Every structure is written in C-alpha cells, then in structure tokens.
Image: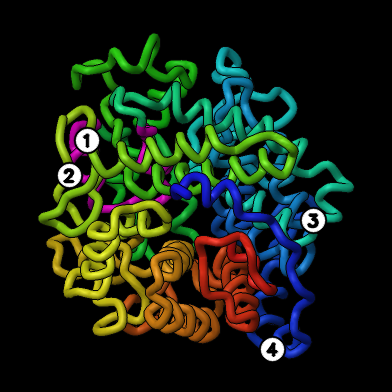
Amino acid sequence: MDRTAQLTARPAETVAAPDPAVLADPLHLGAARVLEENWTGTSTVPSRGLYPHQWSWDSAFIAIGLRHLSPLRAQTELETLLSAQWADGRVPHIVFNPAVPLDAYFPSPDFWRSSTAGRAAGAPRAVETSGIVQPPVHALAAWLVHLADPELSRARGFLARLHPRLAAWHRYLLHRRDLGGAGLAAVVHPWEQGMDNAPSWDTPLARVTPAPTRSFRRADLDHGAAEDRPTDLDYGRYVRLAADYRDRGYADAPGDPRQHRRPSDVPAFAVEDPAFNALLIASEHALARIAHELGATGTARHARAQRLTAALIDRLWDPASGLFLCRDLRGGGLVPERGVSGLIPLLLPTLPREVTAALVRTLTGPHFGLGTTTRLAPSYDLLGEAFDRHRYWRGPAWFNTNWLLERGLRTHGEHERADALRRALLHTAETSGFAEYVDPYTGEACGATGFGWTAALTLDLLRSAASGTTDMRDTRNKGGDRG
C-alpha cells in the first residue's frame, strides 16, 4: 500500500477521558485560567492588552488546546473565525471586536476598511476584518477538535458546516495565491506568514518605500519593549504594503497565475514560504480525513498534498543549507537566511528520508542548537548576522513553532528528541508565565505573558505526555489527540 493509501485508510477514533492527575496539575490549571481570562464568549484573544481581537492562526492553535477543556468552545472558536470568511475564500488574519476602542490596536478597522475596500472581493458586511491572511492551520485544527468529541461534533454538524468553508479557503490559496505558477501559495505581506519580523523578509522588504512614521501610531509599543519589537522602518514598510493592497481592493494578481512568470508581474512583496506551505499541505491531509468522515473519499486531497510536497522540495529545498528557504518571487531566487520556517516541513509525513535526516541535523546543529545550546528552537539562525535573542522573530523561541517541530520529530520517529522538546516546552511555559515568546537560551519571557496559544499548546502537550502518544503520523491515539 502506498503512502497516500495508508493516510486515507487510517480511522478516526475517539479519545479517552483525561487523567484526573493531569486535570489537577498546577500547569494545567494555570493554562486553563489563561484561556478563560482571554475568552470573549465566542472566541479567544491572544492577549488582552497587546492583541485584543481574534487572530486567525492563533485561534487555530487555541482550538487545538481548548478541545481538552471544552470541545464545544473549541468548535465555537473555529466557527466564529470562519463566519468572517470572505466570498473569495480568504480567511482574514484579524476579526475585529467592535467593543474594543479603535486606538487599542493598529492597524485598526478604520485602516483596513474591509467592508468597503474589500467589497469586490466579498468581504463580509456584518463584521470588520483585515484584508490579508495567515497560515492555514485551520483544517488540521478542525480535525483534531472533531476527534476530541466525535459524538458532539456529529450531533452539531460541525465538520459538515466547516468543510465547504475550509475547501474554499484552500482553493483561494491554491489558485489566487499561486503567484509563482508552480503550485505553491505565496504571501504578499510579512504578517501573512505569521513570523512578521523574520530576517528572511529583509531583502524583499528593502524594495518597499515605508509609510512616513507620522502617518501611523504604533499601539504595540504601549505593551512591549521597543527593543523586542520591529523597528519603525520595518513597521513603516508593513503599513505601506497593507495600504497598497487595500487601495487595490485587496485584489490578487489578475488572470491565470500560471502566466505570472516574469518577476515584474508579481507584487513588490511576494514570497513562497516553507512553513506556510507545509501547514497548507498538513491541512490538505486533514481536509482529506474530514471528507472521509463525511462519507466522501479523501484520496484526491491526499494526492494533492503529495504534489504540493514535491513542489515544496523542488522550489524551496536547499541541500547546502540543510533546510527549506523562502523564494522571493520578485527577486527571482531563494533568500539565503536560515529561519525556523525552513524546519517546519518536518511535519510532513511523506518527505524523503534524506530530507528529514538533514532537517534534524540542522535543528540540532550549531545553527539552531536544539538540545545542546538552546532550550527551545530559536526563530532564526544562531549564527546569522541578524540574530537577536529578544527581538520579535529575529531569534526568540516561540511555542507554536516548537510545538510543530515536536510533532514533526515524532512523525519521523525521533521520539527521544521529541520527548525532550516537550519537557522543555512545558517547563518554559510554567517559568515564563505562558509568555508570547522567550529567549531561546535562558527561557526568559519576552512580549506578552498569559498568551493564548502558549497556554493552549501547553494543555495539548500535557495531555499527550500523559497519554503516551508516540506516532504523530496516525490519527489513532489514547488521549493525546495528536492526529
């Protein structure tokens, strides 16, 4: 049986009741308290102060943890986000809460003007959103949430209602965002990739004329140290890119994307990113399982995931660097910066063995130091010229990326390393107060504390540790839900 057939054949089984000892664990109680404090009634904010609205990939990760507390709340988290989906299929990266003052976060709803500027692209009229997207973790999250309580999920028609929205989301990325014409999705703003301030963006961003600093006010500096956040110059470029996209009516490149061969045909910032596409591939596999649960065949989606994996290797794998690199579509080549994004494809079950072996060597070698010099994998190359152990995505370690790497290690049989990383994540979550990100060497908290996805993924790691989950490739488990 080939790998695609094996993936299709795996059954979805219910999960066991949680161990009472886990529920009484102070770390479990602390994580649950964070999620309760950040809950708005229909969704969870990443942070009450710094990020007071609903964020797209945050909510996907939060739902993965929430399913251990309340499968109903986890379902509601995803339903709320996807109810703000645009008619063209995009899932916006922010869904704004109208009760939050405009000056609490920038860019605010009056900057994005989604209901007017995004009208041609099908932005919803009943809620204000941003016009850009974030990594597509949502189908994976929906599948894991379903596994937490399949009876509740089926009774509510959870997957049946989400499936067409998730399928439309993937169609948008696979068609409207295939700006390189090779099958991979491109991002048109650093915020879309989620790792906003990564050094991989420096070269493509250098082409962007920044918006004047007097034209915007950075609310993020009210809640975080300036030395931990992006510079004013980079922020000005972010604002310029977002404003230009808005002023084009949030239109992506017109016509058949396969015809966009010349660099001048794509936007000023257009990048094929390995983590974004790896998460799309993982979610394609999950969407295939969702289709199977709903009585259809998932074979075509598994086959598409295989084709995307081949395209990922062909377009972004760099044997000399030992990891995947970003491709700058306007500049026409790979960006020679080692970032944690280039390790995230370790998630994918059908990578060639020589690629996975190289990724593990890079992860544990001098550039990322996992298990030797660092507690958690840093967001950027320890030996890179732009490395900064505290500045946003230019060196600090993040819980979501390390959670993905833990899954990837386990997927490919690296159980001892995965166990060590899980222990390090749980220890750091506890000692940092569920920080947004941390110093990769010391675990010192940076950014916001009481951060939503840190708390949520802590719950998931606690449950998987208690259940003894070992094979991340299989949807079958005994309490860890690690599909």
Which of 94 and 8 lies nearest the eye of the viewer? 8
Residue receiving disc 2: 335
Q: Which mark is residue 150?
A: 3
Q: Amino acid at mark 3?
A: Pro
Identify the amino acid type marked 2. Val
Identify the residue shown where x is 69% and y is 56%. 12
Taking the view exactly as shown, the residue that stands out farthest to the right is 155
Q: Secondary structure at mark 4?
A: loop
Q: Is residue 343 magenta?
A: no
Q: Quadrant of residue 118?
A: top right
Tell me if mark 1 has few (under 14), some (14-19) or many (20+) residues whose alpha carbon lies within 10 angstroms of its own. Answer: many
Query: Quick one: 411 or 450, which is closer to the camera?
Result: 411
Residue 206, located in which quarter of the rendered image? Answer: top left
Residue 168: x, y in percent? Answer: 60, 27
Label 2 secondary element = loop
The Cα–Cα distance between marks 2 and 4, rounded to whole angstroms, is: 44 Å
Residue labelled with disc 4: 25
Q: Of 219 and 136, which appears nearest the observer?
A: 136
Asked if labels 2 and 1 touch by Cβ distance under 8 angstroms, the answer is yes
Which of discs 2 and 3 lies nearer the camera? The answer is 3
Q: Which mark is residue 328?
A: 1
Counting from the top left corner in percent of width and height, residue 460 is at 61, 71
Q: Position of residue 249 (x, y in %)?
A: 49, 17
- In the rendered structure, which segment of residues is drawn in magenta? 184-208
Q: Earlier in the sequence, mark 2 or mark 3?
A: 3
Estimate the spatial distance between the alpha carbons at disc 2 and disc 3, rounded to whole Å: 43 Å
